[in-house]
Image (spheres, rainbow, N blue to C red):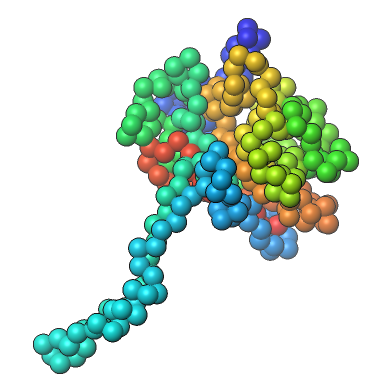
Amino acid sequence: MSDFRQLCSKFSNWGRWGDTDELGTLNLVTANSRRAAAQAVELGTVLSLALSLGDIPSDISGLRRPIGLMLRDGGDALIRDVNSEVGATGEVDRFTPTSEDVWLLSSHSGTHWDALAHVFDLGMMYNGAPASLVTSAGASRGAISAVASHLVGRAVLLDLPNVMGLRHLPPGHAISGIDLDRAAVAHGVQIRHGDIVLVRTGWLKHCRAQSWRDYLGSSPGIGLEAIDWLWTNGVAAVATDTWGFEVIPSQLNLLYGAVHIACLVHLGLTIGEMFVLDDLAENCMDDGRYEMLLTASALPMPGAVGSPTNPIVLR
């Protein structure tokens, strides 16, 4: 545990951008880096990296399946047509028939971003803000709304199974900086400060084909050995195709979510989970280009500690 504390202290961004900063490493994304990212668009190809909310099985509660309810449907429109009344002018009083629905969903449903206020360490969250600032009314610091418009920039895909000659990384594989460097070299892509890094493990594709229940168990993910790499390369945000982002089981037996703590609380690094990266990997393999423009805005929900997103890649 002492080694973990030293790691968190060494790679802390507290105060780096001011005592009240809520963007964390997204400060590294600049107007210039976004303009440069636009140059990666050559074909005009558009890909969504979002998991369809309808694909989430209803019997696995840990995946937080949303519930959709209709407020008005086509039947209501027919009833209104039949019951239209003649007004004082002699004309039929009609309203434009519409349908409307409401969705009940967790802020961490499907493909989503974790806000910096999502995780605490020793009663604190990013930049030394006390956990008490997250109340039943929501987070007054570190909410997802603080970064909602900043998740746009150059993205790089690191397709680890492809590089390692595997269908998917094995459960419990802790992704290290060596793994990430190996993929970057193999793909011929350079990581720049302010990049959004997309890490494919192949685990989502495997579990969708085999068993969703395996998705929530032991799985590959970002390991503590990758924290130095994320810091050194100036990564602005990082997302994986796994449910828990980090390797499961935890590398620290007494501390579940150690990588979340290091990334969210100390680095101030926004992290994404359940990104669908398989079609993107095929596209990148076809033309040998692993950089792209990514827009993956969060919903500007004040006080929310996460948000679903529909990440759009332009290549």
Q: Residue furthest right?
A: 165
Q: Where does the C terminus fall, quadrant-wise?
A: bottom right
Q: Position of residue 148 (x, y in %)?
A: 47, 44
Q: Where does the N terminus fall, quadrant-wise?
A: top right
Q: Position of residue 174 (x, y in %)?
A: 74, 27
Q: Nearer the viewer, residue 275 or 142?
A: 275
Q: Nearer the viewer, residue 287 or 61?
A: 61
Q: Position of residue 48 (x, y in %)?
A: 63, 56
Q: Residue furthest top?
A: 2
Q: Residue at x 52, y 24 (%)?
A: 265
In the picture shown, does residue 96 fall above or below 52? below
Q: Residue furthest bottom?
A: 90
Q: Residue at x 70, y 30 (%)?
A: 218
Q: Residue at x 62, y 24 (%)?
A: 259
Q: Residue at x 68, y 25 (%)?
A: 249
Q: Nearer the viewer, residue 140 or 247?
A: 247
**Horizontal side of residue 162 vs 52, given as left or right:** right
In the picture shown, does residue 98 fall above or below 309? below
Q: Taking the image as drawn, is residue 184 in sight? A: no
Q: Nearer the viewer, residue 49 or 249?
A: 249
Q: Position of residue 117 (x, y in %)?
A: 46, 30
Q: Residue furthest left?
A: 88
Marker count (numbered): 0
Q: Taking the image as drawn, is residue 292 in sight? A: yes
- In the figure, residue 213 lies in which quadrant? top right
**Horizontal side of residue 245 vs 67, given as left or right:** right
